[in-house]
Each structure stands twice: as structure tokens, then as C-alpha cells.
Amino acid sequence: MKPRPTSPARSGFALWAWGGVALSPCVARASRIGELTTNDVTAQAARFFTFADPSARWALLGALLLGLSCGLLGGFLVVRKLSLVGDALSHAVLPGVAAGFLWSLTKNPFAIFVGATAAALLGALAVEAITRGSRLPQDTALGLVLSGFFAVGICLVSMIQRLPTGSKSGIDKFLFGQAAAIGPDDLVLLAAVAAASVLAVTLFHKELLATSFDPGFATASGLPAVWIHRGLMVLLACSIVVSLQAVGVVLVSAMLIIPAATAYLLTDRMNRLLAISAGVGMFAGAMGAFLSFLGTNLPTGPFMVLTAGGVFALAWLFGPRHGVLARQLLHHRNTLRTARENTLKAVYHALETREFEGGDVTIPELAALRGESAMDTRRAIAMLRPAGLGDLDPASDRIRLTPAGLQRAGEIVRNHRLWELYLANAAHFATDHVHEDADEIEHVLGEETVRRLEERLDHAERDPHGRPIPRPTANSTRAQR
Amino acid sequence: MLSSPTSPSPVSPPLEIHDLTVSYHRKPVLYGIDLVVPAGKLVGIVGPNGAGKSTLIKACMGLVPVRSGWVKFFGQPPSRSLTRVGYVPQRESVDWDFPVNVMDVVLMGRYGRLGLIRRPSRADRDIARECLERVGMLPYADRQIANLSGGQQQRIFLARALAQESELYFMDEPFAGVDAATESAIVTLLQDLRARGCTILVVHHDLPTARQYFDMLLLLNMRVTAFGPTEEVFTSELLQKTYGGRLTILSEVAHAAAAGSDRRIP
């Protein structure tokens, strides 16, 4: 199957936002936190952290286990661009949950597990059948299955709620999740699925990696890509089903995608991605369990998703490489560097005009050359000092470049003229078209490219306008870049 | 795929294709292909767009369902001989933002030999490193693949195929969108592989260089128009037959088959 490429970061963000919307019906209940006195909150927190309350123990353990398995499997969903599959499967389980409930007429976790897993796998098969038997793309098939199965599930749930038996109480917990309702039976299932996920990801790490990156090549080299995919889907279905009690049908897909999307922003290696994703999942699970425990009967799912969403937002903003701030900072640094290098270039031009004789350049001279006010020129020169490239000599009020500054100035002018020559000679640009492009390129050419350019141009001495191409000595100190 | 009962003989050709038909959504893309490729040859697969060049390779590698016919590598069905066959898919077929580095990708060439569960050993890493060296990409071993140029990406794919240590190679447009330096590096690599006794089939788009690079040419347009030594096959008549409109009726019928009717709308 060829899924549509979607940015995992964006889908994670969308889900997080959606989590907020889904929470809104619960806001009325959540406001009870405010009604609790400070003493109550402290007492509840103490009960949670001392594990005095068995339900708190189970809730925390269950939340950690579900965070682990959802985080690990979600990592593969995101890199396989199957984020929507988690969403579709989690909605597809609802009729199975209801059927399992009807079958046993109690909240028997095992009956519900069987029913829900069967429904999820049926959903996965339906997606495959729709995609294969028609011209519909996969995301459309996923949307169809998601809403169709969910509608059936809602019908069954409302049927159950009209049943005369008193055992109907648990079913609504499956919509938004209630970690406090996790019992020992649920824990057994959660532990089994988490163990299976860890085992599968450890044993079949190589197979999962290869079939995720390049399924065609993996198949061609003899790896059972189709079976790996099906195995992943079965594990995913099981993981979703056991998580339902704690997170709820509506939000379980968020626990698959948000931790993985967070990890995707923080690393470029798959095993680190899985570790971070599992860690974020477990943290979000534990926080969700804790926050919902503070107020009685608060749904757990939304708190887990909001915690995960908070971590995602932090990674999105402050991630060291792919974060928004890091990118802004890099952009800002590049802008400053370009400005400094343009100043250096202007000084070089001024020096060149007087054939490198007659002492240092004055402020008015440079201002006239750059077509700006003396104030602006002073400001530009002041920017050179922190970078150790040059300064204003206080006695003579002339511009003095450091050896590093002079070196960099020569390099920039060389880059500019080499690039102009390359465009004019090798790429057949008209000589009056090359200047603007060279103004951009001069700041980004690396030494390796420069060396190749020089070779390509037979170490030419002059640019297309007849000006000499400088040869700054390579071993002198390099300016800070 | 049907397999033939004949047993492998020591002189079995690297690749034998018998009456292979492949169709997408009932529309035939390859029609009754018969082909026997001798060992140690550098074979170019040329033909117009939509001629089924990539499909032929994918059908051999078991990546597209085959409607009829069979493929054998070294006289054996593919399921038993996959480790002897290497593959270079089109560069655009993967997501280059995937969280792996160059070394990870090249190591994937070893996975088929390792079998399930087993992890790559130090020896596998050494082989991968050697393959990176052969394509001139060893200094990039720890780079994230997103930061590579098109030519570098292609070299990585070649290194991964080299790590497969195969005797028969299928390469899907390895020259597409690469710089001149990479193109000549690939040609040298292909000749080196041939010198080691490998057989290589390469989907290629550029006719003048096809004549220059390959020992044999397969002219393909839904059918095999010609297959033979380059100097015999590279004739204006055969090229015209491959690229010209001789097979229009065949492709019209194919369209009709896809639509479920041969009656054309006036």
C-alpha cells in the first residue's frame, strides 16, 4: 500500500488540538478540581504517590504499560506514514467492544479484548479490500472505515445503555477512558501486550526498519514485508484494545501518534526515536493517570493526551535541530553572518580600489561605497568586533580588519568572482546577469566546492568583469562562521 | 508465479524469463516476455515511457503480481535464489527524510543474507564500509540521509546493492538525475562488477549513452522488440520499431481490456 505522505509533526499537532476539543464536554466535570480544597488535592496526591490506594497503583502501572506499547508501535506508524491507520483502527474497535460487552453482559476484559481485536482486524481488512477493489486512495478508505465502524459502535453502545441490567455502567468509560477503572485482569492484558511489543520491536528491529524504509527492496532481498506489516497491525490492534480502558476509543490514536511525532522532531535515528517515543508515552500515561486521580471520576484519556501534547509543543518549539526556535536562531545567525561578510567585502573593495596601499579605510569612504549613512557604516563595523574580524581604530577613526577578517574578506570576494566566472563560462549566463546570484552564493560556498570550482575554471586569474580573483592563504586563521 | 519442474543445471543462465505477462488493473503492461540473459553481461533495458521497463524488473523481484509465466535465477525459482540477486530501486521510491543514516541504509543490503531476527555482525559492518568506500561515500557513513544530493543518494543505493554480494543485479534507472561525476563513477562500478563475473540489467533512458555503456540491449515496449549484442540491436530500424507506433493496436486493446470492452466510443 502506498499511503499519502503526511507530516507526522502536523498530524500530531492536529490530534493534540483535537484532544482539546474532545475534552470540552468534560470541562464541566473537570471544574471540580477547583472545588476541591488544597488539602484534598494534597491528600489525593499523597495517596497516589504512596501507592496507598490499590486502584492508584493499578492505574499508574497500566498507564505506564500502555504508554510503552503505544509509544513503540506509534514510532513505526509515524515513519511508515500510517498515522491515520491508528486513528481508523481505534475507532473501528468500538463495535467489537460493544459486542464483547453484549456477549458477556458484564465488563469482562477478556470478552471485550477478543471482540475489540476482532473488530480492529476486520477494520484493517476492510481498508485493504476497499483500497484493492477500487480506485479509492488509502486515506479515503481509512476515513470510510473509521466513521462507518464508529457509527455501528455508537448504535450498539446506545442499545447497551437501554438494557435493563445494572451492568451497563462500564461501557461509557470506553469512550474517554478511566484509568481508575483498570483492574487486575486489565493489567494482565496490558502487561502481555507491552511485553509482546517490546519483544517484537527488539527481535524484529532489523525487519521493521528495512520494511519501513524501503518495502520494495526488503521484499526483493527476501524479507517477508507483508507479514511484518500484518504482524505490526495485529500488535497495534491489541495495543489499542488494551489501552481503551485507560485512554478511551476517541483518544487512543493520539497516544500512538503524539509521542512518536515528538520523538521524530528530536532525533534522526530510528532506535533513539523509539526510545524517546516510549518515554514520552509513559510519561504522558503516568501524568494522565495522576491528574485524573486528583479529582474523582475525571476521564483519564484527555489528560494523557494533553500531557503528551504539551511535551510535543515543547519539542516543536525548543527542539535542538528541528525546533521552531532553533531554526529561527539559525536563520538569525546566518543573517548576521551575511551582514558581517558583506561589510568585510565592502572594506575589501575599498582596499582594492586603492590597490591595497594608502592605509586603512575611513568611515566616510566606506559609507559612500555602500551608499549608506555614516551611522549605518559605524553600526556595521561595530558588528565585526564581537566576531573578531575587525574594529574601528579609536585613534585614527579608521577601519582595521584583523588577519582573520582580512582572510574572510578575501574568501568572500574570491567566492563571488569564482561563481560569476562559473556562471558566465560554464553555465553560459550573460555577464550582466551573474552579480545578484553571486551575492547570495558567496556566503554558502564551502572550501571543497571552491576547490572544485577553481579546478573547473583552470585556476582562472580574473572574473568576467576583468577583476582579479583573490587567493587568500588557506592555512591562515579562519574567521568565525 | 508458476514454477517449472526442471532441475537446475550447472550451466543455467543467470536470468530466464518465460512467457511473462504482467497487468495492472487488468491492463497488460508486459505481454508474453521470453528472455534468456547470458552470464557476465552488462545489459541495458531501453524503451519508451510506459514500455514496462521498471515493471519487468519489479516482476522479476516479485514486487508486482504476475499474471502468467515464470522467472528463474540461475535455474531456480526466485524464492530459492533471492540471495544471489541484488536490486537498486528508483531513488524516488523511498522517503529520504527517514530517520536513518547512510551506514544504516547500506547495512540493509546484508539483511537478506542474515535471515530473520539475526542482527548484523562486525563482519557485515566491515562489508558495508567497504561498499561505501567503493562508491566513494565512506566519509558520509554517519550522515543523516536527508542531507545528501541526488548523486550521493544514488551512490548509497548502489553501495547497499553491493553489500548484497550478488551475482545478478537489477538496477532501475541508476543514472536518472545524477551529476556527471556520479554517472562516470557508476559506469566504472558496473564494469568492475562485470569483470567479477556479475550479470547486470540496467533500465536506461538515454539512447546515445546506452550504446556506449552496454554489451547487450533489450529493446522493450510491452513486448521484447529485440535482444542481442548492442552493435546488432542498435539499428535505426529496431529502434523505430520500439519507439515508433507499430504496437498501437496492442496498447489500444490493452486499454479496452482495462475498460472491460473492446468497443470504442466514437
Image (spheres, grey):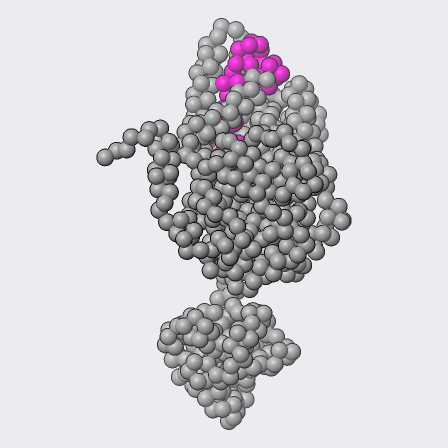
The quarter in which the C terminus of chain B is drawn is top left
Classified by dominant secondary structure, the portion drawn in magenta counts as helix
Figure label count: 0
Does the rendering let one see residue B190? yes
- The residue lying furthest to the right in this view is B122
Q: Nearer the viewer, residue A366 or B17?
A: B17
Residue B216 picture location, percent across and down:
54, 52
Q: Is residue A391 positioned above or below A34 on the image? A: below
Residue A213 vertical placement versus A346 (above, below): above
Q: Residue at x 48, y 47 (%)?
A: B226
Residue found at the far left of this picture: B266
Name the residue rendered at 49%, 31% in the picture. Answer: B67
Instruction: Find residue A186 and report its horizontal and vertical position in percent.
Output: 64, 21
Query: Along the line of sight, which residue is nearer the eye, A291 or B40?
Result: B40
Q: In the image, is residue B145 above or below residue A163? A: below
Task: Identify which residue, A434 or A312, lies in the foreground.
Answer: A434
* Residue at the bottom extreme, as displayed: A358
Task: Say if the magenta span includes residue A6.
Answer: no
Residue B191, image quadrant: bottom right
In the image, farthest residue toward the top: A164
Q: Residue at x 35, y 46 (%)?
A: B245
Q: Which residues are magenta?
A: A84-113
Instruction: Judge whether residue A232 can be spotted in this image.
Output: no
Residue drawn at x 38%, y 32% is B258
- What percent of the width, then of the height, locates residue A465? 42, 82
Residue B204 location in percent, x, y?
A: 50, 53
